[in-house]
Image (cartoon, helix red, strand yellow):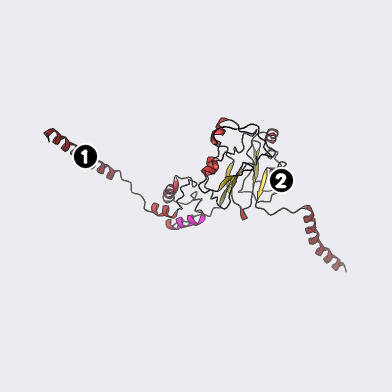
Amino acid sequence: MSTLVIITIISLCAIGIVSAVILYLVAQKFKVEEDPRIDIVEGLLPGANCGGCGYPGCRGLAEAAVKSETMDGILCPVGGAETMNKIAAALGREVKAQAPKIAVVRCNGHCENRPRTSVYDGARSCAIEHSLYVGDTACGFGCLGCGDCVTACPFDAIHMDPVSSLPVVDEQKCVACGACVKACPRNIIELRNKGPKDRRVFVCCVNKDKGGIARKACKAACIGCGKCAKECPFGAITVENNLAYIDYSLCRLCRKCVSVCPTGAIHEVNFPPRKTETEAEKAQAVTATPQTTRETDSKN
């Protein structure tokens, strides 16, 4: 072996050793000590890494929970209240109870209500179709029906209805992670409170066109008439940009708005069937009978 080769090998080894020492010293100088509680909190999380909490995966939420002084605004939608209570106990903090939420599809533009005006023959993607043109109906706000929300859901909690071509949320599987909300380019999916006994009332439309145009595109569209807002005794409904919106934090589920909506754009979910006029009259008669009898007895 020539002297040149030996010198080369020794030089490379020396350079490697010096580089390793430098890297070690730099690593020690800039080393960041990580709070061991982060690993504990991450272990308590379900590990879905869905991003529904607003942080980059469960590790991100764990870091935020440890670094934050309070648990306000920190919630794992998959684990729910039970998981958050465990995390709060591990960190020696208190967590405020938060109402469970669910994804709600705010579009009722099925084929009977929203007739097709063209045929889309491109890639089956809502994002792509939305970027190309208004869609295959006259409504430029409603569901495109390509199922981006279905693909995005990590819990198999949303499916496309083959009849209506609209997404349907499975209440038993939905954990309100928000993946479908982010995937929808038309913003027709919203996270709302489940409500007592899973009952809720919402405007099933996002069309901001003026009344006549919206109604022409879809028979069940909100026309911004404002009747629901006038009828609501709790001030839970506002009308802006020709579209009504119900604030679920103010709504008391009286359902008066549902009765006065001329297009049926306001939906009520999981309520018992309304009594017909005949049933209501019978119930009133039964209630009034004992009172009439007591009045007769008192006169005698």
- Residue sitting nearer the eye, 180 or 239: 180
Relative side of 9 to 226, left or right = left
Q: Residues within 10 Å of mark 2 (few under 14, many from 20)?
A: some
Q: How many marks?
A: 2
- Which x, y percent locates residue 54? 48, 45
**Mark 1: which amino acid?**
Gly
- Quarter residue 119 falls in: top right
Circle 1: element type: helix
Nearer to us: label 1 or label 2 = 1
Q: CA distance from mark 1 to mark 2?
A: 79 Å
Say which residue label 2 marks.
231
Say which residue label 1 marks.
16
Evaluate if marks 1 and 2 touch, with contact meaning CB atoms under 8 Å apart.
Answer: no
Eyeballing the image, is 287 above or below 24?
below
Residue segment shown in magenta: 81-89
- Which x, y percent locates residue 270? 65, 52
Mark 2 or mark 1, which is nearer the start of the sequence?
A: 1
Residue beneath the point at 39% across and 52% down: 39
